[in-house]
Every structure is written in structure tokens, then in C-alpha cells.
Image (cartoon, rainbow, N blue to C red):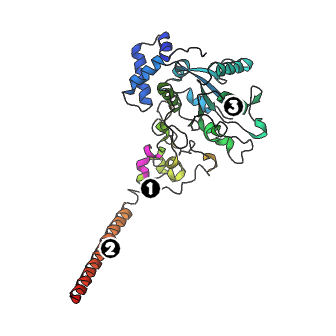
Amino acid sequence: MMEPIETFYDVMRRQGVTRRSFLKFCSLTAAALGLGPAYTAKIAHAMETKPRTPVVWVHGLECTCCSESFIRSAHPLVKDVVLSMISLDYDDTLMAAAGHQAEAALADTIERYKGNYILAVEGNPPLNEDGMFCIVGGRPFVDQLRQAAAHAKAVISWGSCASHGCVQAARPNPTRATPVHKVITDKPIIKVPGCPPIAEVMTGVITYMLTFDRLPELDRTGRPKMFYSQRIHDKCYRRPHFDAGQFVEAFDDEGARRGYCLYKVGCKGPTTYNACSTVRWNEGVSFPIQAGHGCIGCSEDGFWDKGSWYARLQDVHQFGIEANADQIGGAVATGVGSAVAIHAAVTALKRAQVKRQSSVSKEEV
């Protein structure tokens, strides 16, 4: 039988956190998830009554940037997530145990909490040469992944490596690095792509699952809609410059110094779905476009094989409010004039037709 686990609220109280501070935490969490004030009470109720969810976090082919991002979450703080909200029972990067002790912890968690733990996967399994390009605990990572996924309640694919394959799967992909969803096909999988994902996006997904005891609504590719439903371009603070036809033509030109749109120097914001332009990084301080570099589209499948990061997208059309105002005005006037002429011609034809029909009718009479 599964052993009881303390609730988030139990842990917070044991650590001396006041009721007021707890409710403030729930309010901030609701805001971070983009939920209204009414959800604060629901989050508080969930934290007070639901046991902490056991989590197994495994690592395949990756650079650990997802973990590096995760530990920098500010809303909520990662220490609250790891030490209070969830029961992180295995993570070979963060845990103190190593070797046989670490592997024993993994096996024990799987056995004790069958069907009740979440499997978080950072990185992907290489399938070539029987998986020998990534060895964990003396065996191929793909074996560990299958073992951990067999009794998991759900799987979270952290980052583009786990979600899409990322750089390891770039052509010609000699190791056959493979996204998690192509290996684990019998479990619900949430993809949280990005290289790495935003810290608050990662903790937000976990908080949602703990609060509502279900997966967040996903888009057609398996990403949470609450963070991946809009293009970076849609909320980018440089969007007015795009609409005005004001572009950086080369890095460090006058347009770059004025903060113009980076579309012409390769920004992939118009085709990339992520929360970078709204949530941003480092407690909302900045994101790559704000730092002067165009988006490389790292949360989209296959971004590493879609040509140069600095190549201009060819199928994006801007309005050009300022740069082309005369041309647009002329085009609109021409269009209106043409429409008026066409309307007049059609009207004349209809009148002529009515006259002919009237004449024919009189002759018959």
C-alpha cells in the first residue's frame, strides 16, 4: 500500500510559514499561471488537502540547461517546489545519493508509488547501437526510461531535447537520438519545449497538475496551451516597429541602437510559440529579443535543421505603416477607385439589360 505523504501545507507550517504568507504564495502562483483571483482559494485548498506528488526525474542526452533553468524559478521559488510541493524522490543531478544508492532510490520509488508518480524526462534516448551512446547506472538510458515510465501516472518532457530531439537529433543524427514520445507511446505526455524552457513555465506546469490533479490543456503538438498558445511575435515589445516597417538591417546599425524589429536579421518570433515575450527570464527581467538577438525558434520542432538562425523568414508580410505610408495610401485609393468603377459598370449593365427586356416585352404585346 502506498505510504502517506505530507501535504504542501503541512510542510509549510512545519517550516514556520504563516497562514498569511501561505495565502500570498497561492495568490502569486495563480497570477503566474495566468489564472484569476478566484483560483487562489482552489490552489490553497489543493495545497492543504492533497499529498505531495512523488516525482522521478531522469536525464538522457542533454546539457542540463533545463535543470539550470528550473532551479532559478522565482514564482514559485524552486526550493518550495522541490522541498514542499512535490516529493522529488529521484534526480541524479540534484540528489545527494550516487551509484547503487541512487539506483536503489529509483527502484524503491517506482515500487512504492506505482501509478501515482510523475516521470520528468530531461534529454532523450539514443537508440543506435542498442542505446550505448548514453549509459546510466551501467545500462542504456533507454532501458531506464522504459522502466521509469512503465508505472508513471504521466510523463513531462522537459526541454526541446526530450520534446523534439533538439541538437542531438540534428541531421545526420548518428546516435538516433529520439524524442521521448516516440519511445514511450502508452502514457500521457506533456511537452515543455525550449532550449531551455522558462523556469516559471516549468514550475507552472507542475503547480497546475498538483492543483487540479489533471494535465493542462494541450495544443495539437502536446504543449500546454497556457504557455504555448501565442507566438512570441504577438506580444513582442518590438512588434510596433515590425508593423511600422522599421527593421534592424545589420547588427549594431542605427536600427539596432533604436530597438527596431529584428525580423530581417533572422528573428523567428513570427513562427515560434512560447511565453518568452510575456513571462520572460530571470524573474521577468529580459529575454533574447530584448537583449538584442533574434529568436532562434528553439521551442519549435526541428529548429536546428531549418537553415541559418540569421536567415530572414520568407513568408511573413508586414503592413509597413510608416515606411510605406504613401504607397499604402495610393494602393488603397486605387483599390477604392477600381471598386467604384466596377460597381458603376455593373450597374450600367444591369440597367441596359432591364431596358432590353422591357423593349422585348412591348414588342410582344
Crowding near the residue tagged with mark 3, few <14, some 14–19, many ≥20 C-alpha atoms within 10 Å: few
Quadrant in which the N terminus appears: top right
- Secondary structure type for disc 2: helix
Please tell me which of labels 1 and 2 falls first in the chain.
1
The label on residue 146 is 3
Quadrant in which the C terminus appears: bottom left
The label on residue 342 is 2
- Secondary structure type for disc 3: helix
Circles 2 and 3 in contact, beta carbons < 8 Å:
no
The residue pinned by badge 1 equals 318
Please tell me which of labels 1 and 3 falls first in the chain.
3
Q: How many marks?
A: 3
At horizontal 57% and vertical 42% (from top left) the residue drawn is: 298
Q: Which residues are magenta?
A: 233-242
288 is within the stretch colored magenta: no
Amino acid under label 3?
Answer: Arg
Predominant secondary structure, magenta span = helix
- Which of the two discs, 1 and 2, sits closer to the camera? 2
Q: Position of residue 293 (x, y in %)?
A: 53, 44
The residue at the far right in this view is 129
Q: Against 266, is 28 above or below?
A: above
At horizontal 29% and vertical 79% (from top left) the residue drawn is: 349
Q: Is residue 46 left or right of residue 148?
A: left
The label on residue 223 is none
The picture quadrant where one finds residue 166 is: top right
